[in-house]
Image (cartoon, grey):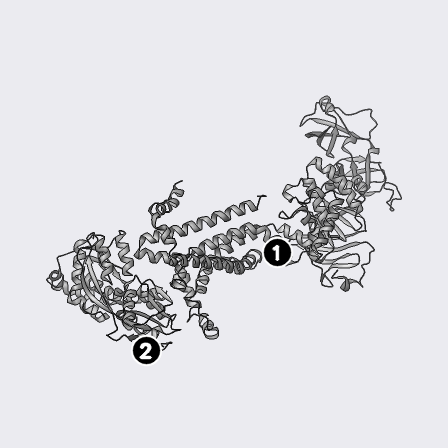
Amino acid sequence: MHRHFVAVIALTAALALASGCSSSTKSSQQSTPAGGGTSSTAAVSGTVNVFAASSLTEAFTTIATQFEAANPGVKIKLNFGASSDLANSINQGAPADVFASASPKNMQQVNDAGGASASTNFVKNFMEIAVPPNNPAGITGVADLAKKGVKVALCAAQVPCGKTAAQVFTNAKITVKPVTLEQNVKSTLTKVELGEVDAGVVYVTDVRAAGSKVKGIVIPAHLDASTEYPIAALTKAAHSAGAKAFVAYVLSPAAQTVLAAAGFEKP
Amino acid sequence: MIGFAFLMLPLVALLIRAPWSGLGSLLSNSEVLTALRLSIECATAATLASLILGVPLAWMLARIHLPGMGLLRALVTLPLVLPPVVGGIALLLALGRRGVVGRYLDQWFGLTLPFTTAGVIVAETFVAMPFLVVTVEGALRSADRDLEEAAVTLGASRTTVFGRITLPLIAPSLLAGSVLCWARALGEFGATITFAGNLPGTTQTMPLKIYNAFETDPEAATALSLVLLLVAVIILAALRDRWLRGSPSA
Amino acid sequence: MSGADRAGTHRPPTSAALAVNGSVELGTFRLDIDLAVGAGEVLGVLGPNGAGKTTLLRALAGLTMLTTGQIALDGERLDDCAADIFVPSDQRPIGVVFQNYRLFPHLTVRDNIAFAPRCRRTGRRESRAIAQRWMDRLGLSELSGRKPAELSGGQAQRVALARALAADPGLLLLDEPLAALDARTKLEVRAELRRHLADFPGPTLLVTHDPLEAMVMTDRLVVIESGQIVQQGPPAEVARRPATQYVARVVGLNLYRGTRDATGKVALDAGGTLIASGLLDLNDQATNGAAPTGRVLVAIRPTAIAMHTTRPEHSSPRNVWQGTVTGLELLTDRVRAEINGAPPALVDITPDAVADLDLANGRPIWLSAKATDIDVYRDPA
């Protein structure tokens, strides 16, 4: 419930922001027809289904609203989940037009199945330790995660955040025994928010998105690992033009600003 | 007939697509065996817990007539219609480390249920117990009260009546309810993953293992599904046979 | 048993083994009961469905509480509303044979019979010995390993009786014990049951709606209608002088209420007049053996009424009246004709008489009856 609650709040906030935004853009568009709409892309319309990694939830929600505002007639439908999960769904024939993965490996799976031809890495995400605000286990660094009695939630090994976290532990030369391997990064974060675990290893962007509900413990750069996020318009996209327009928008400075604000770094 | 085909088609597909050749090596995979053993153990423990908690509850629902009993009955069956994931979240909020009750379990007894095998059993019991309660309650409701009355006139105390008359009379339903409960617990996914998490050897039961496998290795997931299907079929068939033979006076 | 020390000093006023005086209210239904049964006596409780027979039995068994009054067995109070005493069913020294026997389907004959001894914490071996004794007595030994589903109706009845008797009860209660049996089995079992009841030393209450059962099996009858005792006495007496239409019907008599004047004429409430000089009530203190005057009941056997196509001129019967045939029913060896007239009557005639008289529905007919064949007795109501 909590997790959904968070999502709902984020969505509502984004929509509220967007409605304010769009009304102003709309009015400006009406007054100056040669505005942003024509400069970015050719006129497209329809619904574009975007499958994106869980860690992109907040950033893409904002980006989608901005894109819709800039391209009236286009509706972006977002579907967030573990990249491995999404890749699997796409390969099973889910109606996706764009895939934004949290790891090149999952994009490769889609590529291999012929779902995408060319992808572009658009951001990079580093890991951070999330702890409940009162930090019950007194975590100060990566090494504390290996301590006995410290309850750690990680993403499952096949999920990008799980793979990247494993890289961090390799770098730090420690072995972490988690109490649970979650299906995606958001549910790992939820376990931290609910205080069910003492710490979780998630993306920098997730800690930032969670606001005051969790506290982030920075992982020093020499230990940290990152994952690159590729994005691609899918070959089987029902709305090819829309899909390409959206991918182009994500790579545009406007979207990059949103992503940077969320904590993503340039690839 | 169409209904039957609809029910059977996915199962047949599972059989057709199952990687039969790799089945042997998969089954000797220790992680699979661990998950399978954990599933069976937890489902059995959850069934026992359901019997201990559920039979008195069923008796109460069937035999005590008070205003509001209908509402109580409806509430008891709530987990039947609730998405298991909601059940898992509710359990987390109740029995989690910061939960309404869970925080005291943690503070006073150092007991935390999430991410433990006990947590799996709790989640499975929560979801599966209503199956037992509903079945047993129905049996108690339709059980022959006349026979209980006859036993009383012969000098049987309440407990004797329950133990020697009521329980044997509802035995088939008790068994049926237990099997349903066990099967439901065996297949439990949503509440388990939400409340107990997912860790091989501790909380990763077969359905969780299958779900994980499906993302990386769909073939393995198919094979594992087949294993679970076989286990369920074998046990249902065995029990069905036994209880049909057990009651010749049908 | 458990109530003994509480009730031991309070003997009920009657010396009867079982004394009941009180009422049971169940919703709008109310049963008023005042009766006593001696040791070894079999009291039949006769009445139509819903009269309260089963309620009485349940009150005695402790399955229903009295609303007022008390029940005492051998001086021990089982139920006393005023004293707030209620001995629950499982602690009462009773044996109940239920209408459909209620044998435990999952237990063998032996375990059914051993059930009561087991409940009294008698050891398994001794309980089985007790069960064996009763099986021997009732000829059930060969059935000892069978389940109730494998028994015939008569066998099940015997097992039910043995199970009740194995509890070594002080009071035996039987609820329609033969109702579940077919006619042929009933005949055999009835005689057998009569014998076993005669052996039982305590009071027995036998609830039935079968008049034959009531006549043959009991020492005394109590008739209950709508929760009230309407008549009691020896079975023969009840059969001869029914006090209500219900009893008259079950014993097969025409019964009329009326007022008898000094000349011996009875003006019937249902219309018509009858002169009656049949069996006098020798026990009637008020009339000193003579026929009573005032409110009376008049009973005529259906076979004592003759039918004629024309008015009988020179016959001796004093009572002659006219009627119309409204129904004909073939009994085993005779035909019962239903006649609407003043008074209406049931008349039994031979099948060939039906042909001779050319009887058919709607046919007007003359009836006659000898005054000596008509019983008249005081209306107890």
Residue C325 percent across, percent down from the top left: 69, 29
**The numbered mark 1 sits on a residue in which chain?**
B
Residue A128 percent across, percent down from the top left: 28, 72
Q: Secondary structure at mark 1?
A: helix
For disc 2, the neighbor class at 10 Å (few under 14, some 14 to 19, many from 20) is some
Q: Give amino acid for label 2.
A: Thr
Residue B48 percent across, percent down from the top left: 51, 59
Q: Is residue A132 left or right of residue B141?
A: left
Residue A7's disc is: none
Q: CA distance from mark 2 to mark 1?
A: 59 Å
* Residue A14 picture quarter: bottom left
For disc 1, the neighbor class at 10 Å (few under 14, some 14 to 19, many from 20) is few
Residue A140's disc is: 2
Q: Nearer the viewer, residue B218 or A82?
A: B218
Residue C14 percent across, percent down from the top left: 82, 56
| Residue B171 in sight in this render | yes
Q: Is residue B126 left or right of residue C77?
A: left
* Residue C213 picture quarter: top right
Q: Nearer the viewer, mark 2 or mark 1?
A: 2
Residues marked 2 and 1, same chain: no
Q: Give amino acid for label 1.
A: Gly
Extreme residue in the top direction: C356
Location of residue A40 with respect to C263 vertically, above or below: below
**The numbered mark 2 sits on a residue in which chain?**
A
Q: Nearer the viewer, residue C134 or C175?
A: C134
Q: Which residue bears the numbered disc 1?
A: B163
